Image (spheres, grey):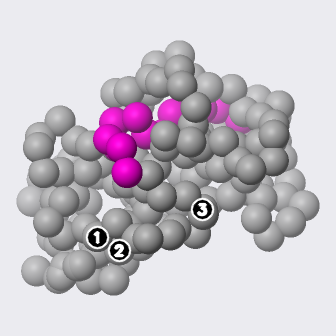
Amino acid sequence: ATAKHAYQADGDDELTFAKGDKLTILRDAEDEGWYVCVDSKGRQGVAPATHVMQDDSSALGSTTTGSASKGGRTATAKHAYQADGDDELTFAKGDKLTILRDAEDEGWYVCVDSKGRQGVAPATHVMQDDSSALGSTTTGSASKGGRTATAKHAY
């Protein structure tokens, strides 16, 4: 998603961003009209939906139209992994990841790490957490996962 407007956080749970920033929408927030997002630096917080425009396509090659509450699943790296290609994600054992969706290649997930880096990770190296830090655990396909957005305006 892309920020249509800049937004200055008004609380500890909110995300500050500039117009044009790229965001990943993880799910709908508890308060109507807000999304739980991660910015490109890996910071997570809520953002007003009025300030976020969902992109037609994302860097992950996925756009969802359903509720974002079907979104990212938290996971922990069971093993370290060194990326072997530009589309892959490097991570250390124990790193926290958010699974956004199943990748096109079977046995891989599209993930985002705590620093906001996105890429594919082998499912053999990732273990889904029993409880999600996002307050949501899903058992369905990760393809119902995160959406990217960009900021619409700065305030």
Residue 2 forms part of the magenta stretch? no
Residue 25 visible to an observer of this rendering: yes
Question: Which amino acid, mark 2?
Answer: Thr
Badge 2 element: strand
Can residue 74 be seen in the rendering of this structure?
no
- Image quadrant for the N terminus? bottom left
Q: Are marks 1 and 2 in contact (CB under 8 Å)?
A: yes
Say which residue appears at 40% left-offset and 71% top-offset: 55
In the rendered structure, which amino acid carries the disc numbered 3?
Leu
Mark 3 and mark 2: span between their CA atoms? 14 Å
Q: Secondary structure at mark 3?
A: loop
| Tag 1 secondary structure | strand
Q: Check if residue 72 falls in the magenta segment.
A: yes
Horizontal and vertical percent for residue 74?
Answer: 52, 33
- Residue drawn at the location 81% of the way across and 40% of the way down: 106
Give the image location of residue 129, x and y in percent. Answer: 56, 23
Looking at marks 3 and 2 on the same chain, the residue that comes earlier in the sequence is marked by: 2
Q: Which residue is mark 2?
A: 2
Image quadrant in which you'd find residue 62: bottom right
